[in-house]
Image (tube, rainbow, N blue to C red):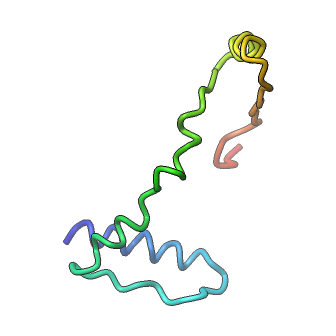
């Protein structure tokens, strides 16, 4: 099953990245595939950050923050997102 091998690869890659695995990688079968797919999908509570209104322009954020009397979180970075500068 194609999806089974993809999921197994993801789980294996995750276990290889850890210096000392705490448990063996699970064995993915057709019987437990749906369970593991549900397990790795984010839950609704874990996606609350996607409901935050983000602005690309600081000026727009400042107008809204002033109107709502809320603070601004300014996220900036320098360089490539993967550290490949």
- Where's residue 60, x and y in %? 68, 12
- Where's residue 79, x and y in %? 73, 38
Image height of 76 relative to 62, above or below: below
Q: Quadrant of the C terminus?
A: top right
Image height of 28 relative to 57, above or below: below
Task: Count the numbered circles shown.
Answer: 0
* 15 left or right of 33 in image: right
Residue at 33% x, 67% y is 6
**Which of the 4 quarters of the picture holds residue 65?**
top right
* 46 left or right of 41 in image: right
Q: Nearer the viewer, residue 5 or 67?
A: 67
Residue at 77% x, 36% y is 78
**Which of the 4 quarters of the picture holds residue 18?**
bottom right
Q: Quadrant of the N terminus?
A: bottom left
**Which of the 4 quarters of the picture holds residue 58?**
top right
- Where's residue 22, x and y in %? 60, 87
* 78 left or right of 23 in image: right
Residue at 65% x, 86% y is 20
- Where's residue 3, x and y in %? 26, 66
Extreme residue in the front direction? 68
Q: Nearer the viewer, residue 52 or 8?
A: 52
Residue at 28% x, 79% y is 32
Image height of 26 relative to 10, above or below: below
């Amino acid at each position: 099953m194609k999806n089974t091998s993809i999921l197994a690869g993801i789980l294996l890659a995750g276990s290889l990245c850890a210096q000392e695995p705490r448990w063996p990688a699970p064995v993915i079968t057709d019987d437990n595939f749906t369970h593991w797919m549900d397990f790795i999908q984010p839950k609704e509570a874990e996606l609350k950050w996607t409901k935050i209104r983000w602005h690309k322009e600081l000026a727009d954020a400042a107008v809204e923050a002033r109107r709502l009397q809320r603070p601004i979180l300014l996220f900036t970075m320098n360089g490539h997102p993967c550290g490949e500068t």
